[in-house]
Image (tube, helix red, strand yellow):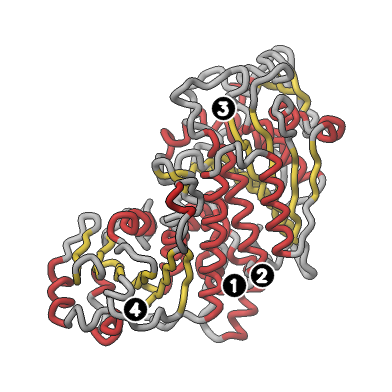
Amino acid sequence: MANVSLEFKASAGDSEPQNRPVLIVGQLGNLQQLQWAQVQGKLQPAVTKEVWQSALGVLNPNPTDSCPLYLSHAVLAALPARLSRHNSPSAAYFLSRLLRSSLPTGNNRCILVVCERADVFALGCAIARAFPLFSRRSSHRRGDGKVLTVEFITVGNHSAILDDNTLKCLNNAAEGVRLAARIVDTPCSEMNTDHFLEEIRTVGKAVGITPTIIRGEELKIKGFGGIYGVGKAAEHPPALAVLSHTPSGATQTIAWVGKGIVYDTGGLSIKGKTTMPGMKRDCGGAAAILGAFKAAVKLGFKDNLHAVFCLAENAVGPTATRPDDIHTLYSGKTVEINNTDAEGRLVLSDGVVYASKDLAADIILDMATLTGAQGISTGKYHAAVMTNSEQWEAACVRAGRSSGDLAHPLVYCPELHYTEFTSAVADMKNSVADRENAQSSCAGLFIGSHLGFDWPGVWVHVDIASPVHAGERATGFGVALLLALFGQASDDATLNHASPLGGSREGGQEHGDRERESKRRRLV
């Protein structure tokens, strides 16, 4: 699937299944609302109306089901209709999974998605997740790429052909998801800190922004003891890179801070032979922020938005940080290292403090593949969210449901958990004393403590260690979540609707514009 060109169109046009294989997919209730005239152009003459109706009658999703309409060229598939409150009503995850098993083969294919208008964004991103870009298989070096065209038919109260702005949103969001997945899938031999900085420069060039980069010994001189200490032993030096979008008329400043550990050996607290493979994915937070930043700016972001990338390779070498070393982080706090494999919190602490001190951010969100314990806390499909704001905790959960990038809260209780980092010789240690006491929450609190628990702005921590991949492939997780969560700061109507912060745009264009502007200025 790596050489697939993905494009969302208002209409994919008519074609016989032999010439262009087609998958028609949706929740069963939505599929049953379709008129034969809406699909016959993609099925006839191979599939008749009677065959179509018969296939609808035999579908029994549990949780999904599919039925061939014509050999392997045309397939009808149903998504689950009954979903729990902690899942997305769009059934986005099941669409990604179903595409891997039920999409017909061919070089020119079509997916026809039948859904309600509110589910378009989540399902569009779910399709992008099913088609990662990175591959080094020799077969992908030969021949032309494959083309996949996606068309939506919306049903219900807001059924209409998707307009150009919605299609632009879907194409940009999909590009961001696939960019993030490609970076995460790429091994460190091809995605070290030098390569990641090139990715940042490429995105900056695409949106007209020159990144700010602090690197190598300059990090040490300027006091970034966390990033420098983690990455100083690697062949390619660590870096703090920033992309800044500062439009006129902005009313607040938002910073997204990403953990970009391009490879994590664990350092001198080295990982074992079964736990080290896959650590190329430890840059998943920074990759998601890069993909989301590109899409957000291209779709029109009205507030100041800074993407802060904390890049390092946690390598083993003569200059590697040792357990018992003490680093002074950008916050000024001293940290005694008792586990060099708890490195992500060190680089992120420098990043969030930089966002507060140097960028004067009102809202700081850090995203990271931070803890293996995240998968135990919230599972493989839900990111773990911690924040100093109850409103934003609820907003993250709702944004997860509307985007398909699911999220669930962690315990936020610094007065009970912060003592886990007590040190006799420094302000704190970098790893907990009791590994059975809310590890993922404690890891997040370490980052928050460098901002200060009395910091007046909004701080959100998102741990995506497990959902960043499905099996051995990256998912691009986090891009859709960020776009939806901050959708009220966007010019794009689709992202406005996906955002949990703000109201609906119904009731007239002029009124809708005023309401959106008002809601946008109340993200905090």
Residue 408: give its label. Answer: none
Q: Earlier in the sequence, mark 2 or mark 1?
A: 2
Q: Residues within 10 Å of mark 3 (few under 14, many from 20)?
A: some
Q: Is residue 472 above or below residue 8?
A: above
Mark 2 or mark 3: whose residue is earlier in sequence: 2
Cα separation between marks 2 and 4: 29 Å
Q: Which residue is mark 2?
A: 300
Q: Which residue is mark 1?
A: 492
Residue 140 image point, x, y percent: 46, 53
Q: Are marks 1 and 4 in contact (CB under 8 Å)?
A: no
Q: Earlier in the sequence, mark 1 or mark 4?
A: 4
Circle 1 — which element? Answer: loop
Say which element carries label 3.
helix
Asked whether disc 2 touches disc 1, contact meaning CB atoms under 8 Å apart, the reply is yes
Give how far apart the Cα atoms at labels 2 and 3 are.
40 Å
| Left or right relative to 372: residue 323 | right
Mark 4, residue position: 156
